[in-house]
Image (tube, rainbow, N blue to C red):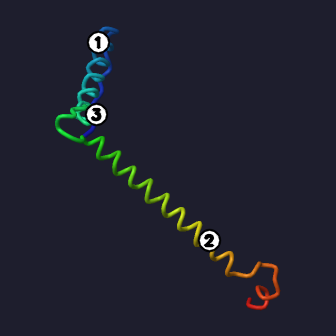
Amino acid sequence: MTEVVRKPRNAKEAIYLEARGARQSSEKLLPLLKLIDDDDSEGPGPIDEIKGVLTAIIEILAKQNQDLAHIKSVCERMSPPPDSAEAISTH
């Protein structure tokens, strides 16, 4: 839905309209404040869960990076150097 913005009649009205728009925008952000509200009595909150998921993703990516490095090193040991006669004769 498109909001119709009217031109203010004077400076006071312009300030009022700007302040009202800022208030409406900030009220829309209130649910985000609930996410960062630390209440340890309720256990881990949503931010803690997000941190846990991100930590798990980083650990998985680190493991994949190690695995790919290992695969690369094995492949390099198994394949002949690109300038060898064996590499040229197979192509």
**Closer to the N terminus: mark 2 or mark 1?**
1
Q: What is the spatial separation of the Cα atoms under label 3 and label 1, in whole angstroms?
A: 35 Å
**Closer to the N terminus: mark 2 or mark 3?**
3
Which residue is under mark 1?
Answer: 13
Dot 3 falls on a residue whose secondary structure is: helix
31 over 13 or under it: above or below: below
Q: What is the spatial separation of the Cα atoms under label 2 and label 1, in whole angstroms?
A: 67 Å
- Give 15 or 58, whichever is nearer the viewer: 58
Residue 73, given in percent of the width and then of the height, sits at 64, 71
Amino acid at dot 3:
Ile
40 over 60 or under it: above or below: above
- Tell me which residue sits at (67%, 81%) in the image: 78
Q: Nearer the viewer, mark 2 or mark 3?
A: 2
- Tell me which residue sits at (76%, 85%) in the image: 87
Which residue is under mark 2?
Answer: 72
* Quadrant assignment, res 3: top left
Count residues near mark 3 (Cα–Cα under 10 Å), then give few for <14, some for 14-19, many for 20+: few
- Tell me which residue sits at (23%, 27%) in the image: 27
Amino acid at dot 2:
Lys
**Closer to the N terminus: mark 3 or mark 1?**
1
Mark number, residue 81: none
Residue 56, given in percent of the width and then of the height, sits at 38, 54
In screen coordinates, is 69 left or right of 24?
Answer: right
Mark number, residue 36: 3
Residues under numbered marks 2 and 1 in contact, where contact means CB atoms less than 8 Å apart: no
